[in-house]
Image (spheres, helix red, strand yellow):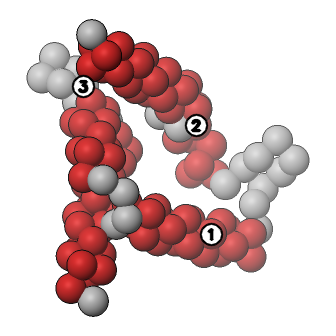
Amino acid sequence: MCDNALDLGRAKTLERSVARWENEGGSVEASDLAKTHATIVGNIGDAEAVNIRVRLIALENIVVALLGRVPQESSELVREMARYISPRSEATPHRLTIEAARNMLAIVDRAQHCRTGIKKG
């Protein structure tokens, strides 16, 4: 019974996360916005774009480090999410979604190497 409640809670969390992603990062409007580097305030300059990239790299490495320290189930949850956002056979593939899923799996794989290195070291 406890496992069923946990599975239901995870399913609801996953559903909310995907819905939020589809509304914010996966919409056509958001992808068009990213192409132009425009914001509500105006265009993003080169220095700001570089700063965003640097921060993204830092955040990705933080996630890798954290996933390297958590139980394997957490990595499996990320893999499950990557499968969930990957296009289903009846859906039209979206390049950004495919790339996001691929990146998620790459991060989990990097974390696995980190986990192995931590155990050896």
Circles 2 and 1 in contact, beta carbons < 8 Å? no
**Residue marked by disc 3:** 92
Quadrant of the drawing holding the N terminus = top left
- The amino acid type of the residue labelled 2 equals Ala
Question: Which mark is nearer the camera, 3 or 1?
Answer: 1
Which residue is at 56% across, 72% downward? 58
Q: Residues within 10 Å of mark 2 (few under 14, many from 20)?
A: few
From mark 3 to mark 1, how far is it between C-alphas?
31 Å
Which residue is at 50% across, 68% downward? 62
Residue 101: give x, y in percent of width and height: 29, 46
Q: Which residue lies most toward the bottom here?
A: 121
| Residue 108 occupies quadrant | bottom left
In the foreground, 41 or 85: 85
Whether residue 42 sits left or right of residue 29 in the image: it is right
Which residue is at 30% across, 80% downward? 118
Q: Secondary structure at mark 1?
A: helix
Q: Which residue lies most toward the left here?
A: 89
Q: Residues within 10 Å of mark 3 (few under 14, many from 20)?
A: few
**Residue marked by disc 2:** 30
Residue 101 visible (yes or no): no
- The amino acid type of the residue labelled 1 equals Arg
Q: Going from the N terminus, do you reach mark 3 or mark 2 first?
A: 2
Residue 75: give x, y in percent of width and height: 28, 51
On residue 99, the disc is none
From mark 2 to mark 1, how far is it between C-alphas?
20 Å
